Amino acid sequence: MAFEQVMLRTTDGQEFGPASMDDIIQWHRQGRVPADASLLDTATNEIRPVADFPALAISPPPTVTSAPIKSAPSATDHLIPVKNPKALAAYYCGVFGIPCFIPLGPVALIFGILGYRDAKTFGVGRTHALVGIILGGLETLAILILAITIAYGVSHPGH
């Protein structure tokens, strides 16, 4: 079974790809594939060590080493930014806080701020974080107004 589209996984948990085996062989020749890395076949989810592949078992010539090439986020990553869970949580808390009127506004606001900060690192989730900040801020404001109104009504009966 030949791996066609693969993800390169390093021992520290980083993933690079998807890439073709030709790309991985090129990276290997450039000295950018760690010997203890693994390859994940995107079609079958099979994981095998780099050493299992004859084209990658030969030591590459000495070159200037650099990190493997990171792939740009895909369109799906922008629609559902699973790499930025704080932004995703902010979005859902903000959206579901409106119809349910559960006090999710402050949660959405906090996760939105944290997710927006993480969007630079992950490259995705900026829009989701902004939605969480805006809706969370509005919901938090509504909760505060409601609390003040109730407190005023209790302290001034008959008005």
Image (cartoon, rainbow, N blue to C red):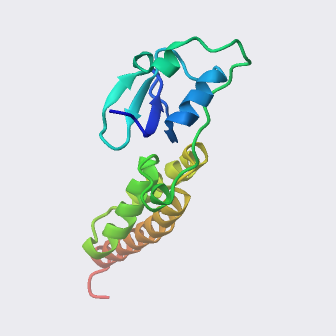
Q: Which residue of the protein is positioned furthest toward the right in this rendering?
A: 64
The residue that appears at 51% across and 20% down in the rendered structure is 56
Quadrant where the C terminus sits is: bottom left
Provide residue 111's location: percent of width, then percent of height: 45, 52
Q: Is residue 3 visible?
A: yes
Please state if 83 lies on the left or on the right of 73 as rendered. Answer: left
- 151, above or below 17, in the image: below
Residue 142 location in percent, x, y? 40, 73
Q: How many marks?
A: 0
Image coordinates of residue 26 in percent, x first then y, are 62, 30
Quadrant in which the N terminus appears: top left
The one of 152 and 76 positioned closer to us in this rendering? 76
From the viewer's perspective, tell me whether residue 127 is left or right of residue 76.
right
Find residue 22 and report its image quarter. Answer: top right
Instruction: Give me the residue at 51% from left, 21% from top.
Output: 55
Front residue of 55 and 138: 55
